[in-house]
Image (tube, helix red, strand yellow):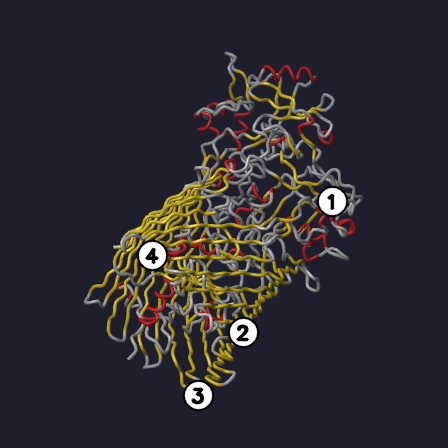
Amino acid sequence: MQTPRRVIRNPLTCSIAFALALSANAVHAETLDSSASAAESTATGAASASANAAVTLDKMVVTGSRIARPELDSVMPITVVDFEEIKQTGRFTLYDALMLNPAIGPGLGEMNSMGQEYDKGVANIDLRSMGTNRSLVLVDGHRWVSGGARTAAVDLNTIPSALVERIETVTGGASAIYGADAVTGAVNVVMKKRMDGSSASITTGMAEEGDARQTQASFATGFDFLDDRAHLVFGANYVFTDDIPLLDRYNKRYVYQVNPANTGPEDGIPDNIIIDFHQFYRSPYPTWCVFEGKAPCGTNAINGDWYQLVDGQVRHIPRDSYTTISNNDTGTQDGGPDTAFGIYDYMLLRDKSEKASAYSNLEVQLSPELVWNTSVGFASSYVSGHSQWPGHRDDVRATNWWGIDPQTGTAHPGSIARLDDPFLPDHLREHMLAEGLTELPFSRHYSHLPMSREIHRRQALSFGTDLSGRLTDRIDWKGFLRWGQVEDDITTTNMVGRQEWLNARDVAVDANGNPVCASEAARAAGCVPTNVYSTEAPSQAWLDYVMPYQRDERTRNSLLNVGLGMNGALFDLPAGSVRFAAGTEWRRETLDTRDDADTAKLHNIVWSPGNDHGLHPDMSASRRVAEVYGEVVFPVLADLPGARRLDVEAAYRYSHYSDNPSTNTWKLGMIWSPFEDLSLRAVKGFSTRVPNFGELYSPVSMVTLGHIADPCQEGRVSQDKDRPANCAATVPGWTGPLPTPNQNAPRVFTGGNADLDPETSDSFSYGLVWQPGFVDGLDVTADYWEIEIDNVITSIAYGTIMNNCVNATGAPDMGYCQFVHRHQSDGPGHLAGEVDYIQAQYANLAGRKTRGIDFGVNYRFNLGPGSYRIGLNGTRNLERRVIAQRGSAGTDNVGQFQYPDFKATLLNRYDIGDFSFGVNTRFISKSLYAVNDQSLETREMPYVPAYWQHDLNIGWAPTSTYSVSLGVKNVTDSKVKHPVLSAFATTPHLTADSVNSNNGAAYMDGVGRYLYLTLKADF
């Protein structure tokens, strides 16, 4: 009799009989011709023979299907990484491990989650770079609770990593197997269920510069009891990651700006040039422009003189030290002194974080036919970094963020130096008198004030219980209950009170000649006057009055998932047994977000653009889903000439939603082995994905922008041959290019859309698996894949919306233009045609299509007295098309740096005696900065050079108990290969589809050469 699978259940929930379902974790599901213990033995052996990281493990039973089989026998491409070996490369998190897979793009991670209004510090993966909402994450084959406030994506940091055994990635449509949100595939995190003895390790390291410290400590143990009928495993770990100030890596920021010397298309002059980015009006010192005795300069800034007040002295900025790029008091300069704004001096390249987790699993053999399994997990994370940009500041624009003065009905101005100001420095007074000025509006960034920090404290709880047994000698049954909850407590510190700021800035002189707040009521409330010229740290009394505020928010996600199912063999055919899996599942998902309950405080501390904090209206949403599924594999031919094996399989899933239409998903596949060494495989699938909570119900919020890169502005309209005509067709009152920079305050609306329709997707892949018998240890895989989504649900960055509207050939693309709203006529603070607002909410666009080729080569062989392993995984992107309007060709982004033509990972490992040596290489092909530019003349340095990164690790195990390893990540200190991508200032108000897409450190290493040491003991 075959040994039944081991499954878990907690004694407290034994009575919940309906909480039983088919295990999707193929690690515990045995093949029909081998026992569970044999499968475990195979898995253990394969893990020890794996390459150093993302190398496909041969003969391992994995999750490509609910019918367990070795991964090279699956119709869908599957890759596997051994997490313990990944840690030897200095990567301690699931996110870092998965980033070695060329098929996975950065979703949100520690190098690019800054600037998020809800999800700073989360770790989401993006299979096929088609959106994190289309990548399903499982733990032991079961759904995991979402970790985002406005997304269905799982935060990998909420999965206890202390006992992760391996990570399986199905890079193909898996919707019929696991649910419609597995459009681009699924990642299955497999936890250790058995362990004899204990293991402890500690790793610490830092960058060559002496910063970027990271420390990891872990402990795990396991043992049998109850006469070996029960087994318990427990593990815990802790990871500390230090922050990296942006200035520690980059003392300049380079950006693209319109080239003032450009004369038009095909003139041999780049339309956009890379500049040493400065914006004098955001300098940390009072800065102003004077033209012919008038300040501010307005459109005469290009001919005016710029000054700064540095340490009480007025300094003139030499005209030959900079070039004016955009002409205005709030314009942009190329170059200038270090005292003039060039980079965000308080921003972080990487946030500080702490992660801790614990996990325990109990397995009990209740009888020879019945196994009970239960698991409990806890994970917490703490992340602290800068809150939204651009910090506390003022500028000279009439439209400011200090609101409307109720006494005058006009906007409160920015800071103004006046001759009667008691804080006015003597040298500035002399300057004003020399220029004939009684008032001098100036701009500055108050970087000497305490940084406003956004702090997230997340806690994740998980519980699972299973009961499994044997229905007949050929069919197993299993049931499960899974519950999870993620709570995020968010605190934003050092927030300025708008009214307090205005009160403290309004300075008068008391009877003794001392500066005081002008308002008697404000003085009674503790008002301390502001010296707007000072760069010294303010007093505690000033901070207690002006910046006493913090904002407290909370988000909570929960998931309850139960089910019952069976798998096994139905009957025999001449070619083998017909295998099946079938079952039913039910789940309830909830999302609850709460902003600070003090609404009066919120309206005093939240404004735009200023610190760009947005209001976060409360949201509560829930969903119930009932599903039935079935999967079957028919062996058609076996052991015949030209048909060693031919299997055909099919899968179907029906899903009934409480808040959306019911959906159907299906899959058809086949695998044919004409002879022993070669298998050909193909699979086609269809799915319907309903919008998630964030896409449907996120409250619509609005932010006001200072400047906007309007493609119809002067200097930009000539950068595409279609823009002039399309701008003329869409811009009201068009008489020519709009001025740059704009002086109005355009708005951007983001949020959900309750009128969204479900999206449908078709996926298809075919490929081969070659394991030549004449080369022992070699396997080669190659697969073509294609995913096409219709009625795609997406939210596109407002800049992309504007550009795609007027870049279309023949006529404006109304699929995008419908979201851009412009002023119809001149009015206060704006010109006719300037952008009034842009709708960047979620919407249904016509479609999205992506296709490419994956390949893998794994080879294991003896070399001299040792053994050598090499693994190569690569992805060739062929198409990345987004179509906004039906009938249009859309835009194909393949070849842009986010979607390079080719990505690959090469992993090498050599074991000899007590030593091991590993070399890992990542490669990203040369790409374009913006593939849809009109021509290579559109921008200076249009290409992003190819990127290579090499990691080295050496291990020594002098005894069976103790081992030590030393490693260097990024041995050659490879940098982000494009100046504009290197010191990218994180942009707020991004969507799930445009998360910091210009942050080069999300794609290439931003830390630099990094050294680490690991000590490990197994006992």
Point out the residue furthest to the bottom here.
574
**Above or below for 602 versus 23:** above
C-alpha distance separating marks 4 and 3: 48 Å
* Residue, disc 4: 913
Label 4: state its secondary structure: loop
Estimate the x, y position of residue 439 in percent, counting from the top left.
65, 21
Residue drawn at point x = 72 percent, y = 24 percent? 291
Residue ID for mark 1 = 833
The one nearer the camera, 31 or 236, is: 31
Dividing the picture into quarters, in which one does residue 260 lie? top right
What is the three-letter code of the residue carrying label 3?
A: Pro
Give the mark, 2 or 3, whose residue is nearer the N terminus: 3
The answer to whether the residues at label 4 and label 1 have Cβ atoms under 8 Å apart is no
Q: Farthest residue to the top: give it.
A: 512
- Dot label at residue 682: 2
Farthest right residue in view: 735
